[in-house]
Amino acid sequence: MPPPAKSDTSLDWDRMSKTWGKDFPPDYRQFIERYGPGAIQNYLVIELPEYKDAQPASPYSGMLLETKNAEAAWNREDKSPELDGADPELITWGVDASSDLLCWDTSADDPRTWPVLVRNRDDDLWRRYDCGMVEFLARTLLGDFTECPLGDLSLWAKQSAFYLNAYEEKRLRKQGLDPWTGQPDPYTDTYDPS
């Protein structure tokens, strides 16, 4: 998945750690610094890291809002057997067009060991994947789990994918183009890039 040419993402990772009360995994930090927040194949959104003491970047989505959604879903939905009795501290790093939530269980002190917990909306079941965010994405694209962890096969065993960060999406929309096709977008005047 080639990185985009430019990202305008600038974060104070020390402030991120302080406001959340924990460091973020190195693979996630490197991903955000290189790719920026955005989407894979117009399906899976990698959330903008947000400071926990700030207003959410958007009233519709984002790390803060999706983490609250994940906490509510955890309390009401079934878990796979390996999660029996688990009481994770969740942070959501991704959501997809199938309404799946991709989180870390941040209970451990070392963020390099945080597993990925996925709430699959297709069957309203939580599952645990003992890998980091980048490995999870790579294994999904390679089809390297026993089954697709997401509620749709859009990324499953795709081998390669296109990543569009939020900066590039805004730039293309301002030019009147659909960012995923490069074609003129007749609805560009109705899009709010903020």
Image (cartoon, grey):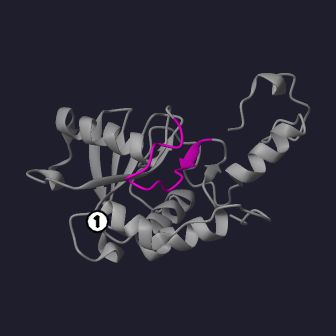
Q: Quadrant of the N terminus?
A: bottom right
The stretch of residues the image draws in magenta is: 43-58
Whole-percent x, y for residue 35 in the image: 65, 64
**Dot 1: what SS?**
loop
Q: How many marks?
A: 1
Residue type at the position of mark 1 = Gly
Q: Place residue 183 in its image quadrant.
A: top right
Asked if the magenta segment contains residue 55, the reply would be: yes
Extreme-left residue of the structure: 85
Residue beneath disc 1: 21
Q: Nearer the viewer, residue 151 or 12?
A: 12
Prevailing secondary structure class for the magenta stretch in the rendered image: loop
**At 60% across and 55% down in the image, what residue appears?**
37
Asked whether residue 179 appears in the rendered view, the answer is yes
Horizontal and vertical percent position of residue 38: 63, 51
Compared to residue 25, the image places residue 184 above or below, namely: above
**Residue drawn at (82%, 38%), measured in percent from left and top?**
173
* Residue 117: image location, x then y, percent: 32, 54
**Is any atom of residue 132 visible in this view?**
no
Q: Nearer the viewer, residue 80 or 32?
A: 32
Question: 129 and 34: which one is in front?
Answer: 34
154 relative position to 74: left or right: right
In this picture, residue 102 sits left or right of residue 185: left
**Within-10-Å neighbours for mark 1: few <14, some 14–19, many 20+:** few
Q: Is residue 10 magenta?
A: no
Q: Is residue 13 above or below residue 136?
A: below
- Left or right: where does residue 79 sit relative to residue 122? left
| Farthest-out residue, front | 54
In the image shown, does 173 or 1 lie closer to the viewer?
173
Which x, y percent locates residue 126? 27, 44
